[in-house]
Image (cartoon, coloured by chain):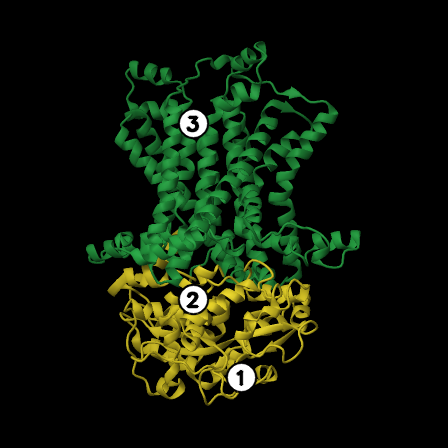
Amino acid sequence: MNFYPLSIITLLFLSFTTVIGAEVNIYSHRQPFLINPFLEKFTEETGIKTNVVYATKGLAQRLKAEGKNSPADIILTVDIGRLYIYDDLNLLASVNSDILDRNIPQNLKSPENKWFALSKRSRIIVTSKERVKEGQITKIEDLADEQWKGRVCSRPGSHVYNRALMASLILSLGEKAAEEWAKKFVGNLARRPQGNDRAQVKAIFEGQCDISIINNYYFGKLKYSDDPSQREWAKSVRLIFPNQSAEDRGAHVNISGGGVAKYSKNKKEAVALLEFLSKAASQKMYGEINFEYPVNPNVETTEELKSWGSFKSDSLPIISIALKAYEAQKIIDKVGW
Amino acid sequence: MTAFESNQDLWVHLVNTVLPIYVVNTLFLFLGVLTLAGGLGISTAWIITYYSFFGKKVIEWALILPLACPAYIIAYVYTDFLEYAGPVQGLIRNIFGFNSAADYYFPEIRSVMGAIFVMGFVLYPYIYILARTGFNNSPRSLYETAALYGRNKFFAVGLPLCRPYIVAGLALVAMEVLSDFGTVEYFSVQTLTLGMFNVWIGMNSISAASQIAIVTFVFIIILLVLERKARSSQKYNDTSKRLNNISPKELSLKKALFAICFCLVPISVGFIVPIIILINNVFIGLKPDSFFAIFPVLLNTIFIGLTATLIIILLAFFSASSAYFSKNRALVIIYNSAATGYALPGTMLAIGVVIFFGFLDKFTGNIVFLGGTIYGVIFALTVRFYAVPYGGVISGYSRIPSNLFDASKSLGYSTISTSYKITLPLIRTSIIAAAILTFVDIVKELPMTLILRPFNFETLATYTYQFAHDELMIEASLPAFFIIITGLIPILLLQNQLNSFFHSKN
């Protein structure tokens, strides 16, 4: 035991001095167990070592406080709102990369090339296979219909995913209609908003409610869960990609993404990692590991995801969602979602 | 610093919409947990101190165990257990032949009541430990007097005499409740702390979030000041050391069984049931790889825990002693306000530390870079958990008769040698107990370590969190189990010390 503190201190001193070999330091809002498979492959291909700090909150404040001294090279996040906070605090560097320009569509990156979406997830409706008929619900707006009173479950509105959905409704319906929708939606709830997206599917399985909204990948996680009971939950629900009719806007999508830190000392390596993550092989991995959709238009969606149905996604520039977060939260507070 | 920006528009919105809900929920949770934890802690401490029955040795020690369980982990565990699909309700449906949730009433675990339940049952040991010391140190003569006058021993003597200890315990619990994020987030209970994060992350306004943090902070300070005011009118020094021995009353078999069952409730709810569920999960998801992965994480946790505990205990002893001897009011106020760091949510405190380090590193031109190092983590832990031993050490001091110091001083000994020769031995056991509490708290700590840690550095809590955050209970159970075990190690190792702490006569 005695040598351990010593070895830690030695390691720390070593970490202050210049390190041999290329490295890239990552501030991540994504759990290590989800990004490690990507990073291992990256190191294997490029020889660049990766170091990670993971936290759900506060990393932007840390980066800001560290200023020019920050060791961080790259930021990886889920949800456009979180990603945009870094941009808003002016913590990201503009990146000029032909590879990124080619792999990531215009509406899924920052106008100044400061951040880039790396995967897409769709916010979809799930309904009970038994208690809701196919075709009865086709769009998000339907969830405000009075016939579903006491039959809808939801995660709290203040969660980033619901806030982003709310923002997308403000953008497409206008602030007044969006608030009206939210009020009626909350009126239809079977129980106080609670639980994460898994818990919503579980509640439908248990019969506490019949309808909910989840991120598409949760369905995959449940369908292939190690826990047999979770696989049963998945079997009890039908997936609906909302707002698909020819004249409609398409399903709301959110992203995971990343950007290079403004004061990165390893910019070349950081850009290399972003490029790596936008490449076909990695884009496919997002689907295989986490049931997410590729952002790279040249990459095919995995067979599994295809089997859930194809869909058109809302083509709003993703940044507009982040810019409406404040208004969305206001409505959420007002209606008590 | 960020708290001084003007957010008038935002505050108008908050006051008109969610703020009243935040305040009501916070107050409800606060009073509920204090009542439950206080009731459990004081009643069990009283039973253990004043009665003797078979199995008491095991029970008096087992009553501390829930301390090792982080509240948010217990919240996860009980949700699965008590939910509609969980075994408890399943059993109820089977027995009574119910078919759906509409057929019967079962309280919802994801609610304010659920949060009170979970926090009350894991936080009561703080009060139990401190109340026991208090009861133990109350002189027997006073109980005899009470008996002579036909007064209730508990209300007439035990409770008033023990008050500084109980208050120290309640203050710790209160601060834990106000700073909790994990449990209230999981149960979707809209407290001020949850609201703070909605404003910060949702409305991208860290300054308004800090202002909410300050509201809760002021609230706890007002409470502490009020309590201190109320107490300062009563001063009591125990001089009757010889009569201090309390001889516990032997209970009849029937009463002994009742006492045992009573004490088993908090032990089972706060420890046995959750640990069984966790172990069960560990076996469901058993993979040898996960065991090997945990080993270095475990070492990190122990290293951080020991280092920070040592620093905190030294600081607490130093500050409590100097506050006691110097009687300098300014000093006392500084120390007391330092102890309120415990009432701030860890994440907010971590951000304060990050800003402070950023400033320091710029100021010193990077001679030592503190941001994102292990020293930073230890510093933050010190700021946060300094309150834990400080309260205990101070209440230990308040019970040492001042004539002892006066005697030592009049014999020509300096304050320092008095502390070393008189005080330290007298409050040694209090310090050990305080060290255990601190270590356990550090092992459980999540939000600050998460934000401040260096690259590739995991503690058991952060390692658990990456799974628990996604409600992957099976994967989270193994590291969560280790958090509890690690917290238990010092309790087990120092069992003798703890025992003598409980039975110490100052």
Tell me the mark number nearer the camera, choosing from 1 and 2. Answer: 1
Query: For mark 1, what is the residue?
Result: A244
Same-chain status of marks 3 and 1: no
Whether residue A47 is visible to the viewer of this picture, yes or no, is no
Query: For mark 2, what is the residue?
Result: A29
The x, y position of residue A308, in whole percent, is 60, 81
Disc 3 secondary structure class = helix
Tell me the mark number nearer the camera, choosing from 3 and 2. Answer: 2
Same-chain status of marks 1 and 2: yes
> Pointer 3 indicates a residue of which chain?
B
The x, y position of residue A75, in whole percent, is 37, 70
Q: Which amino acid does label 1 sit on?
A: Gln
**With A226 as the anchor, is B172 left or right in this view?**
left
In the rendered image, the vertical position of residue A290 relative to residue B139, given as above or below: below
Q: Colour of chain A?
A: yellow
Query: For mark 3, what is the residue?
Result: B396
> Pointer 1 indicates a residue of which chain?
A
Return the residue nearer the eye: B489 or B225.
B225
**With A184 as the anchor, is A167 left or right in this view?**
left
**With B92 as the anchor, is B121 left or right in this view?**
left
Query: What crowding class fits label 2: few (fewer than 14 Cα within 10 Å), some (14-19), or many (20 or more)?
Result: many
> Pointer 2 indicates a residue of which chain?
A
